[in-house]
Image (cartoon, rainbow, N blue to C red):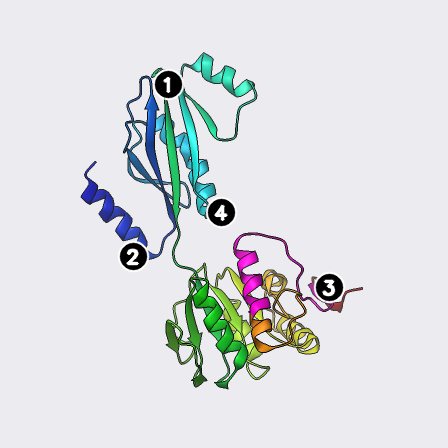
Amino acid sequence: MKQADFAKAMGALVGRGEPFAVATVVKTEGASIGKPGFKLIISSTGEVLYGTLGGACPESAVVPYAKKTIRTGLPKTIKVYLESVEDSVGAVLKSQGEDEVHVETNCGGNMELYIEPYLPTQRLVIIGQGGKDDVEDALVGLGKALDFEVVVIDHSPVLTEQPDQVARDMEGFAFSDSDSVIVLTKGARDVETLEALSKLKLRYVGLMASAQRAKDNLAQLKKDGVPEAFLSSLRTPVGLDIGAITPTEIALSIIAEVVADRYGKAAVRKTLGITAGASGIKESS
């Protein structure tokens, strides 16, 4: 495996914004075709894209761990035992650590692997209504501080913080599956904007609104035939319940919810009694 070709394969994935993981042999003991420095690129769907660990057995065994690192964003070290069928079956029947893998091969050695996820830069997309908006401004600053690529879609933003990109409107803008979208349209274009977003595959969509406006918007979206899956996933009123009052505190509650959602962490949402169920929009008890 040529290092230059391996680097090109990684570069192509990064250029396309695709998540992937790299498994690297860092240590071996006993007989093993794979040697320290052998590398393997695995896609988020578990496809082996490039490289080798010395054979199909260890490569197929590492795929579930690679997919998990991509999902969690956390690297992992595992030990792969290259054993006979009898030894492998016996090891599986016994209690084994979650970081141990036993594969059926007659090498007889073992290898230690370091699996590292490579994730595209997360984008925070803020859809504004134009003019000065202190929450919008604070979200730009907090998003950049947390290493998001911050995009503002706004026809006339007034910002002290500079986003990475500004687009005048949603038309022609290329959204990504991993985008977190915050809608700050202040009622004027809430429904129109959310209906457009409901047709996309997005990681997170939140609408800043009062409890009553959130309820009215959800009812209208349901009446317009927006899919229940989108209504159930929509965060509105957006943000975690931290008692936020000032614009910066409100922005903090929003960005905290985005981060919690990104890592799959449960948190107390600022629901204010609004739910969107299959039978219609109603107040929670």
Secondary element type, mark 2: helix
17 and 231: which is toward the camera: 17
Label 1 or label 4, whichever comes before in sequence order: 4
Q: Which residue is mark 4?
A: 72
Label 4 or label 3, whichever comes before in sequence order: 4
Name the residue: 43% across, 60% down. 122
Q: Which residue is mark 1?
A: 105
Report the label total.
4
C-alpha separation, residue under disc 4 versus residue under disc 2: 21 Å
C-alpha separation, residue under disc 1 versus residue under disc 3: 56 Å
Secondary element type, mark 1: loop
Secondary element type, mark 4: helix
The reply to whether callout 2 and callout 3 are in contact (CB within 8 Å) is: no
Name the residue: 43% across, 67% down. 144
C-alpha separation, residue under disc 2 versus residue under disc 3: 44 Å
Q: Which residues are magenta?
A: 252-276
Q: Amino acid at mark 3?
A: Ser
108 and 103: which is toward the camera: 108
The reply to whether callout 4 and callout 3 are in contact (CB within 8 Å) is: no
Q: Amino acid at mark 2?
A: Gly
Q: Which mark is residue 15?
A: 2
